[in-house]
Image: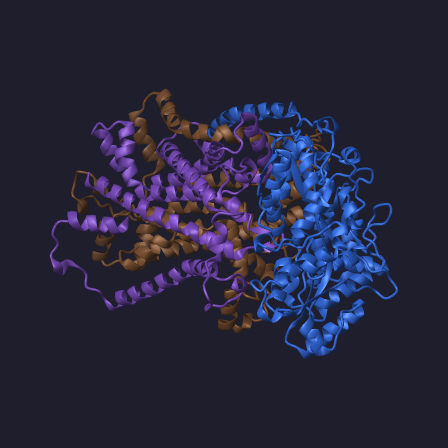
Amino acid sequence: MHPGPLRMRGPPPIMAVRKSSTAVSTTTAARAGAAARRQPSAWRRVGIPYAHLTPALIAIALTTIYPLGVALSNSFRHWRVNETRTPQEFVGFQQYAKAFADTNFYNAVWVTLIFTVISVVLSVGLGLAMALVLNRVNWLSGLTKALLILPFAVAPALKGYSWRFMFSPDYGVYDKMLKTLLPFTDSINWLGEPFWALMVIVLSEVWGWAPLIALMFLGGLGSISPEIRDAARVDGTNAWQEFWKISFPLLRPLILIVVFLKAVFSVKIFDQVVTITSGGPGRATESLNFFVYSQGFTFLDIGYASAVSWILVVILGALAAGYLWLMGRQESK
Amino acid sequence: MTDTLDREGARTRPAVPKRRRPRKTGKQTALGVARLLATLVILFFVLFPILWLALTAFKPEREVFTTSILFRPSLDNFRGIIGGANDLVHPMFNSIIIAVITTVISVPLALLAAYAFSRYRFPGAKSVLLGIVATQFIPGVAIALPFLTMFRDLGLLDTHLALIVTNLAIVVPYNTWLLKGFVDGLPIEVEEAARLDGCGQLMLLWRVITPLAAPGIFVSVVFAFLLSWNEFLFPTFLARANAITLPVSLMTLDQPDGVEWGQMAAAGLLVMVPMIILATLVRKHFAQGMTLGAVK
Amino acid sequence: MTRKTPRLRSLVPAAIALVLALLASACGSGPITKDFASQVKSGPVDELGLLEGKPYEGTHIRFLTCCTAVPQFAALNERTKQFTERTGITVEWSNIPYAAFLQKIVAESAIGGGTYDVLIWPDAWGPSLKIGVQPLDEVMKKDGITLDDYSGPFREAASAGDPTATYGLPFRGFSYNLFYRKDIYAQLGLEPPTTWDEYYQQLELIKNRTDKNPLAGQFSRNNGQDLYTWLTMLWSNGAELFDDSGAPAFTSPAAVAATQKYLETMRQGYTPPESTNWGELESTTNFLKGNAATVLTWSWHLEDFTNPGKAAPELGGNVGVASLPGFPGQDPASYAYTWLTGVLNTSQHQGAAWEYVKWITHADTEREIALDKTDPATTTGITVHNSNMLDPQVNAANQGLPQIQYNTLQSARAIPMNLDWPRIMDILAVTVNEMANGADVPGKLAETADEIRELDR
């Protein structure tokens, strides 16, 4: 269902509203078909989109191709910065093999996986819920909407310290509140237990992102004209149907992208691990990024750190490719 | 956004007799109350840590690590971060300049690219889309040393330009994907109609797409600014004294003998102020932009 | 399928770029190190050991440092203008966040380019960083500077794991001490303990008779903060981390016994359960707020404990400091921590850099700073020269702490100075943290010994 040609001169709003219950967005095929009709030549079909892309590609390629290449090269060589200043001999896939034999590497993968799943589900879920609640016009919602960017504006390290101190059994305000309201939590040593330590990190991350994600969804919801909603309300649809039949389908591409973006950021979680738990208790909160950082800059084994980094790139690349495929299928429904 | 549209919609809607307005049922009032409660909960969730941070910023050193709410407020923390060893004002200006320039450059680039990915089908589209964001998969640690080498060889160490360039490399990929998500949700009929009217490509982008996608663009502006604002790894390596940014300076408050938490909180608070100003300004501007688009 | 072809085609430019990058990095050369002795000038020196006649006049050097707000650093920073007056050398201080300091030094040392000239480092990083630092022996001999005025652990740290050379001069260091509440001890009729058993009996008494934490423990794995007390107990029980061949030796009966003793504080509830993730910050804060009766930490913390702006009122005049207890019949041992300063071997101004190093580490500079109590921001009692630690004036100005530190240092040791210490330290820190969280002691120690043996060193 489209918001309809409300913003153009043309047929009056009500007539143009198509209440189809199946396809909810123009298919890529239809768009491509429409585009193709206007660009018959193959050159224009390729040239025009790439003309759009070039500025962005230049900005990215200029600074990433070389470092990525060097990182790849480093991953195939032996280089400990405390032994030599330049990379040493070529060792093939030895560093990669070392990673796959390293229990701490698997630990980091596992920790990162759990963290990513929980934090993405919570951030996007809460963000969506917040967006739906705040999609109103009144001063309270307006005020809250304006405040939504604040959590993301807090530097990750600062977020980390803030939440670490708020959960300290000694002087933490959240600790006090939780232990007063929920007495069964009285014996929990938040940062001393593997599960809760990870949850505190998750919470600090969700606190920072969910409001921003809500803002993103509000942006998406903002493209849905109120005419549709009013028309729907006149017809007697309730809030749930309104969400499910109107808002959700239109938001779906955005939701997919937001989930993906949040996942990428979650996989790279670092600052809060350092400031809240330093990877502890034990190694229970050592994320992959933290693991790579320790290998590279604490233990000064750049070769190994580069290899693990590229393993991460491949994993994420596979995920992203799968995602693109999934999105492509969604669009062609 | 919705509010302006509402107002706008109300203005352009043909006169509707009052009795057509649906009467609020009991269920709807209950929903309204639930909504109000939910909004308050959200407000608490979002605001409380910030309020606590603000409180801590005014605490004298002895009270910083306590849960006390009543104390004699002191400005020592603020004095500590303005001028002197922990001066944060100069880095804050650097951060603002770098973030603004990054945002101004990155958003149009990302929008162009996002539009292409969204509206056109061309060979290599999926791979390029994947490749763009794949540059962000690698942990900063692995590319920090190569970056340092690169900029040292270019003689750009400790310059704002170096930091802007590295920020662009980070921001453009994410924003391209984000804006693609927004553009995907825009109605294609508007563009088709505009093209039928003889609208050229650039005009189309400027006059039609930008106002339509304004809420999305607003978000991507905020996102670009904040990503650039919070970047820590590259400024640490690439900057010395001239181009040092706020996150790096903030971290100097984490000293080997302890965290100057009071001062950090004060710094966090000082940072909020430009954020709020920025958010209000940009929101108003884009709300207006949307109205202009709608009138067309 | 048709989708695969375009993907392959668009991989070609990426592949080309990667190959080019690989080639480029293969031809890369390291930073150029410069010969030290040739850059250092000789001549008559003044009372601070600095060359007279300003031979380096007009040189600008950069100081790679962190933590400029720490009082001793702030004091040095402020006094640098005196140095500039004497020598005509201007010094630009950096202020790298401590969290990123090691990586910055590594980057500068490996990629170099002569951006910085003088640097500082904590002892643990010495072995890893020394490929970027100039050995100082030759110039020290030329200028008649020795390490005689430093105690054992500081001298050890200066060699950065290489017994034949000196890489840095100590300028900041402290011993590990026991701080206790004089009022609580007096109330219970206790004296500072001489053995660990005595200490634990005192903790038991404090636990039963007061509502304070007997000990503010520190079991966080961050940066090896849980290792200081553990190593102290290990060494004072005659056990070692490594034997002469470098193999792990902490599974010996003496080591296991010492470890069990260490963890008794946790098991017996002398330290609160949340201290399993307490670092230096949390444990000293706990003591500062008056919630703990004793704390084991670095000597310089006395400055904070006696600062009315930082400490709870009940601490006023009630903070005592003593050497750490030992095991009966064994020599006491404790851990000493050192910061050193040296010259980067990619620096373009090594002669001027050496002048600054000399100035920072001169006993008179240190003495002046330790006596100057005019500004709280630069007030510090840090002394590493024996002559200063034994000086009555310095002691009078610093509550007698330098003398206590000197006494402790005579039986103190530095951490093992080998190349792999960062990794080993991390593994040990995780192990101690896990044991504090309840893991079985002998089993965990054996596991860790295996893990360390398997490290490819």
**Image vertical order of residue A163 relative to residue C122, above or below:** below
The x, y position of residue C179, in whole percent, is 70, 65
Q: Nearer the viewer, residue C334 or B107?
A: C334
Q: Residue C166, can we see it?
A: yes
Judging depth in this view, the residue of A89 and B235 nearest the camera is B235
Chain A drawn in what color? brown
Front residue of C221 and C148: C148
Tell me the colour chain C is drawn in. blue
Q: Residue furthest right?
A: C329
Quarter of the figure with residue C143: top right
Q: Quadrant of the C terminus of chain C?
A: top right
Task: Classify C56 as above or below C160.
Answer: above
Q: Name the image colouring.
A: by chain
Task: Count up the numbered dots.
Answer: 0
Counting from the top left corner in percent of width and height, residue C163 is at: 82, 40
Identify which residue is drawn at 67% across, 27% down: C30
Q: Which chain is purple?
A: B
Q: Position of residue C381 (x, y in %)?
A: 67, 55
The quadrant holding residue B115 is top left
Up-down relation of residue A306 to residue B40 (above or below):
above
Rendered location of residue A322, percent (x, y): 50, 40
Residue A121 appears in view: no
Q: Is residue C158 left or right of residue B279?
A: right
C410 left or right of A170 in image: right
Could you tell whether C288 is left or right of B181 in the image? right
**Which image quarter: residue A309?**
top right
Query: In the image, is C139 to the left or to the right of A321?
Result: right
